[in-house]
Image: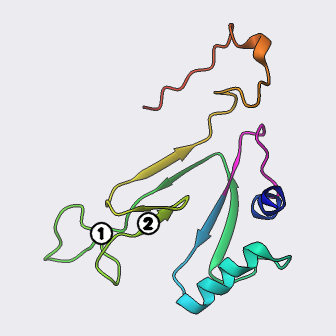
Amino acid sequence: MVAWIFQLLASVSRLNNGSMALIVVQNTSRTEFVKHLKRYTSVKNQFNFPFVETYTVQEVKVQPRLKSGPDAKENVCLNAEGNYPWNIDGDLMKEASEVHVRVHPQLIDLYGVNTDDLESSQVTCNCI
């Protein structure tokens, strides 16, 4: 069941192709969002909504919209409810900060693949 749902969610993504699926859900009513979520467990296309966009990316940088105007404080980001509920991969991010997500192809070995090359691996991550 999980593999079937993953194929629907990210049909063009693979573990080794250096890309990830970016699913952007714009503001919508709670009723429409629940309809979208229910489609994840059905054979219907869960992306066939006007408020859902999908992309295949290698890197994404999300920046908050800053409040503008004469009374705006520095780095203040507010939505209609007055908080910052960014939902990134199921985690609520309440800080008004930039989020940068990048694919690092072959940084780790999955399921024991390439264990012979593990000793000589030169792949590094310098993003932190």
Magenta span of residues: 11-21
- The residue to which callout 2 is attached is 86
Q: From this view, report whether residue 51 is shown above or below residue 20.
A: below
Quarter occupied by the N terminus: bottom right
x then y, percent, for residue 12: 81, 54
- The residue to which callout 1 is attached is 77
x then y, percent, for residue 26: 55, 77
Predominant secondary structure in magenta? loop
Quarter occupied by the C terminus: top left
Q: From this view, report whether residue 79 is shown above or below residue 90.
A: below
User: Which residue is the extreme one toward the left?
Assistant: 71
Q: Relative to the observer, which residue lies in front, 23 or 117?
A: 117
x then y, percent, for residue 44: 83, 79
Under mark 2, the amino acid is Trp
Please tell me which residue is depicted at 75% across the width and 63% down the height of the picture.
9
User: Which residue is the extreme one toward the front?
Assistant: 1
The local crowd at label 2, few if under 14, some if 14 to 19, many if 20 or more residues have their Cα within 10 Å, is some
